[in-house]
Amino acid sequence: MSAPSPPPPARFRLPLAGYLIVLVGICWREGLRFLNQRGRFLSALVRPLVWLFIFAAGFRSVLGVSIIPPYETYVLYEVYVTPGLVAMIQLFNGLQSSLSMVHDREVGAMRILLVSPYPRWYLLVCKLIAGICVSLLQVYAFLAVAWFWEVELPPIGYFTVIPALLLTGLMLGAMGLLMSSLFRQMENFASVMNFVIFPMFFASSALYPLWRVQESSLALWWICTLNPFTYAVELIRFALYGQFAPLPALVVAGCAMVFLAASILAYDPSAGVMARRGGPENAK
Amino acid sequence: MTARSRDIPPLQALDAGVAALDVRGVSHVFGARKALDDVSLDVPAGSFTALLGPNGAGKTTLFSLITRLYDNRSGVIHVLGFDVRRQPAAALSRLGVVFQARTLDLELSVLDNLLYHATLHGVGFHAGRQRALALLEQDGLADRARDKVRNLSGGQMRRVEIVRALMHRPRLLLLDEPTVGLDIASRAALVAQVRALVANEGIGVLWATHIIEEIAPGDRVVVLHRGRVRANGTYEGMLAQTGGEDLSAAFLRLVDDTGESAA
């Protein structure tokens, strides 16, 4: 009953249209899940609003922000923290969608994605794009509420921020993806969120301009300067005022590429952590 | 043994005469533990092949290698003549899988789960919807298409998972202990559903299980134990080989070195 030795098969190529179908399908499912989880949307909206309504209002009188680019006049503290809060939304979203990937892997749903015949790197990129689309919805919902709170940006800013958001979303999403490949269980991952989100957020230019940090602590200033999240915040800040910031754009793009390449490698069956840390208990 | 249906999909014409699955000399280690040791087996097109083994025999590891969740470092695996390592896209597009763990999205409807899977295989929404509704109709689940998966019974979820695995018209279907946790009636329905696929559509099936009752005369049987193939042949051949009066006695004889029981 031995099998006949297989004849040399014809060359096989996946149809190009299929790539588009895969992308649309993954985004569509992410959208459905997002609509199903109203709590997630609500908390994504409430979190930055709490910062804006309470924290920023309280610190308005304590922290004066002088005129630094891209601002042309003195700005309220609420206005100063808005870009940082936009980046925070994306940070949370990026880590949350990778958290759902860890969960998917634990319950096995991840395997459905990975048995698709399309290349694994492409599936992961599609997953990232879907996450970025969701984060855009969250950001615009936040900006709309902020507008009523007198955080009014130049109208053009609402458009020019889109490319910046795509890039920062890619960086933060890829970072989450990389982290999701490194943790086997949700529990580990949840604690890492604490160790990643808060330090990244606080040690950046999101809440205070870097020159003020430099006045108080040179060490902290260095940490903020080396933190990629700082550049994500600055890229968004300038873009919200219709300006392009070359250095932040370069840093964010560079980090995005590094994180993306590393996570693709981590999910590659022949090279990645999947094989090395594998075991039946992890394979389900 | 094989009764091919009349509407032959284009892939099938190319597949004639090639084994649905051909595993040759595959080994796999996790750290120091050898999960698979020089495993060879094949699933001819249009056959029902049972992969019989106690828990921990290496069945799930073998499935992970065939579906390329891990890379096989030694040996070769061909799906319909395509090497999963060298031509993963061609191999995976001919392969349908039902994993041991439940992998449906509980919050989405049955139809949405099926459509998502279809898009992952490059099948568009329109074609996917038609295929899904036809398969659900065949399986008597059409009235549940819009229900959330959460509201289905365990047996229905499994049947939906089989429907999902068939969405992209695979020629090889892998099932990893699909009947675990099901009652006797659902188990029988599931086995019947898969046997009908073999008989009517000529799909090759590899059915991993540790439940002897799911195997019927005429099936091909591969016994896997502690990562090694202990027997490979037909139901009848295995009985003759071990001199056992029934299959469970034969099976116990093949794996009795550990004292593990089969069921």
Image (cartoon, coloured by chain):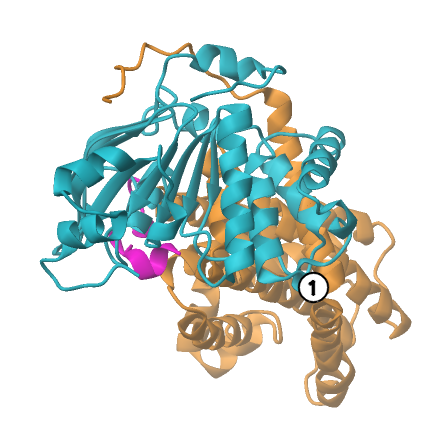
Residue under the point 75% across and 52% down? B144
Instruction: Give how far across and how far down residue A30 sits, in percent.
Output: 67, 52
In the image shown, does B33 or A192 lie closer to the viewer? B33
Query: Magenta segment: does it hold A281?
Result: yes
In this rendering, does residue A243 appear at all?
A: no
Which quadrant of the view contains residue A75?
Answer: bottom right
In the image shown, does B211 or A187 lie closer to the viewer? B211
In the image, the chain rendered in orange is: A
For the N terminus of chain B, the quadrant is top left
Dot 1: what SS? helix
In the image shown, does A165 or A195 lie closer to the viewer? A195
Residue under the point 58% across and 57% down? B155
Asked if B195 appears above or below A60 in the picture, the reply is above
Residue under the point 40% across and 73% down? A188
In the image, the chain rendered in cyan is: B
Instruction: Give how far across and how far down residue A13 sits, in percent.
Output: 49, 17
Q: Which residues are magenta?
A: A270-284
Instruction: Give how far across and how far down residue B4 sits, in percent.
Output: 53, 18
Q: Which residue is mark 1?
A: B151
Instruction: Give how far across and how far down residue B26 sits, in percent.
Output: 20, 36
For the C terminus of chain B, the quadrant is bottom left
- Outermost residue, left side: B257
Residue under the point 66% across and 65% down? A89
Q: What residue type is disc 1 on?
A: Asn
In the image shown, does B11 or B232 lie closer to the viewer? B232
